[in-house]
Amino acid sequence: MEFFLIFFVILSSLFFVFSLFFYFAHKRNLRILNGISHIISDSEKSIPIIKMIDVLKEMKVDLETRYSEAAKSRENMRIILQNVSDGILIVDGDSKVAISNSAVCRFLGIEDCILEGKKLVEVLKNYDMLNFIDKNLKDFTDDSTEISVVYPERRYLECDAIPVVLKENEHVLIVVIKDITSERELDNFRREFISNVSHELKTPLTSIHGYAETLLDDDFKDVKTVKNFLGIIENESARMSRLINDLLDLQKLEEGKTKFEFQSIDLSKIVDYVSKIVKPMADSVGVELKISCDKEIYVYGDFDRLVQAVLNLTDNAVKYTSQKESDPKSVEVSCEVINGTDCQIKVKDTGIGIPTEALSRLFERFYRVDKARSRKVGGTGLGLSIVKMIVEAHKGKIEVSSELGKGSEFRVILPIFSEKSPKNGDSISA
């Protein structure tokens, strides 16, 4: 009996203690909730618990929505920044990278493209770029400069520094980096082109002027000398005419003003046509011209333009082979199917050959392996550039291989005509 009495007293005591705990805990929660409701309502009156919970739920949803939108906006800005073609680099007052995009790493050859939070000296290896940014961070002024880098490839970069003051007087420098390599290369090409054209025109003009001046002072008694001088004047005039015609032709091809009359053409007809033109010249300089072409290989192209391309290659082969001092002297023009979709016209000679280091530049305008020899055979330095453009307009490609002293081989690879090609007689600008 005493045991049950003691157990009942202990149980009653525990119940009383728990009752007091839950009472005070509940009162505490009520005070907290009423305090929150007071803040929410901005008044001294409290809000019913259920209503206050609804308000808190709405606030929670609103905060989650705003956070999601802010995160989405930040991610969108990051994606936009990464896809901007220009490099964007934002540096704070401590010379640390605050924001950057992938273009910066691409332009400057930075492999580890996680730049945020790092010091500039840790990520930038280009002295000119570091010096430019440091100077403008200290002076905090607008500035612009051009910087060249050589790694991972040669680039010309235009850099603009823009100082910006953010909230709480925080100073940052925005550096915009633009790749102007193509513009600089185009400028260099224009200067080189003008220089080459001027030189190519000046040489024959000087010869014409000199021989004409000599003839003016001559009494014309030595008829042989006069004829020789007039012959030189005629040859130099013809060379100028060829150069000007090639320049005009090249300009039209580049600007897309050349009309190509596409139709189904048998390659053998092109090769036969070219051989009839070149054979007399080949015979006169002791070069054997060989023709080998499979019948009924059809391509879709402009007959006159393809003749122009093959004629140029064959004419060059004959002229340079004739310069070889020893036999054999031969040029072979052939055409064949090389696979199910392509065919080729091959011009192979046993001439003087081309140095390996010159092959990569062979199709550049005005490039000559041997300038003196090229002028001797009447070359303008533009023929192969024109050939390449004609072949590419036919959706083909041109390849070359050569061994110095043994000869060269040019291969014009063209797609075989199919029913999917445009219909005969189509006129296309290229």
Image (cartoon, grey):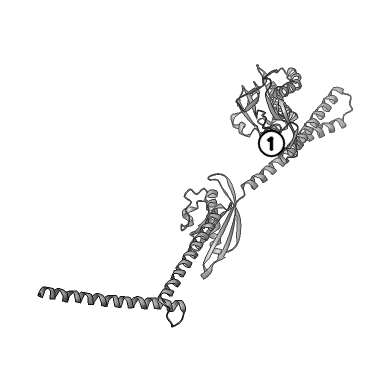
Please report the residue visible at 42 percent of the width from the left and 80 percent of the height from the top: 46
Quarter occupied by residue 292: top right
Q: Nearer the viewer, residue 162 or 69?
A: 69
Q: Position of residue 130 (x, y in %)?
A: 52, 55
| Left or right: 72 as drawn, with respect to 254 | left
Q: Please identify the quadrant where the C terminus is shown.
A: top right
User: How many badges with numbers are in the image?
Assistant: 1
Check disc 1 and give the amino acid type: Arg
Q: Is residue 410 visible?
A: no
Q: Nearer the viewer, residue 307 or 350?
A: 307
Quarter occupied by residue 57: bottom left
Quarter occupied by residue 375: top right
Q: Position of residue 110 (x, y in %)?
A: 50, 49
Q: Is residue 428 visible?
A: yes
Location of residue 108 with respect to 259 vertically, above or below? below
Q: Position of residue 172 (x, y in %)?
A: 53, 63
Q: Nearer the viewer, residue 119 or 313?
A: 313
Location of residue 136 with respect to 371 vertically, above or below? below
Please report the residue visible at 59 percent of the width from the left and 29 percent of the height from the top: 356
